[in-house]
Image (spheres, rainbow, N blue to C red):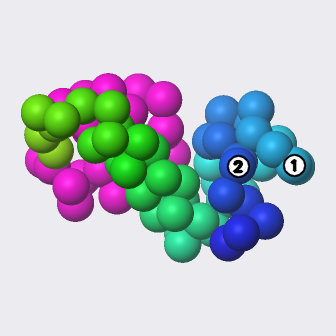
Amino acid sequence: MLLQQKELPDGSGYPHGLSASQIAPLSALFIVSHYFVDYVIDHPDWSPRDFVKTYRPRLKGQYFNKIFDSIYQ
């Protein structure tokens, strides 16, 4: 999980440039959680819906979609 924490589903991440299908489910959850914490800190009036609308277009892929679906449908 820690080796994949900087990966991005479009393959532009670090250190291996993994695509969404290569990122483990738990790593995907960790990545979304990191973005969520940053979002909450930067937006005091945050909402789950706004977070999902902001990051769903950036974080696409099977596991990412499932995470966003569970946050807000």
Q: Is residue 67 magenta?
A: yes
Residue found at x 71% / y 48%:
7
In the rendered structure, the answer to whether residue 10 lies left or right of residue 39 reads right
Of the numbered discs 1 and 2, the one sitting upstream in the chain is 2
Callout 1 crowding tier (Cα within 10 Å): few <14, some 14–19, many ≥20:
few
Q: Amino acid at mark 2?
A: Lys
Instruction: Characterize the magenta stretch by its predominant secondary structure.
Output: helix
Q: Amino acid at mark 1?
A: Pro
Secondary structure under tag 2 reads loop
Query: Which labelled disc corresponds to residue 15?
Result: 1
Callout 2 crowding tier (Cα within 10 Å): few <14, some 14–19, many ≥20:
some
Residue 5 vertical placement versus 52 (above, below):
below
Residue occupied by mark 2: 6
Q: Percent from the top left, x then y, of residue 68? A: 30, 50
Q: Nearer the viewer, residue 39 or 51?
A: 39
Residue found at x 48% / y 29%:
58
Image: magenta residue range:
50-73
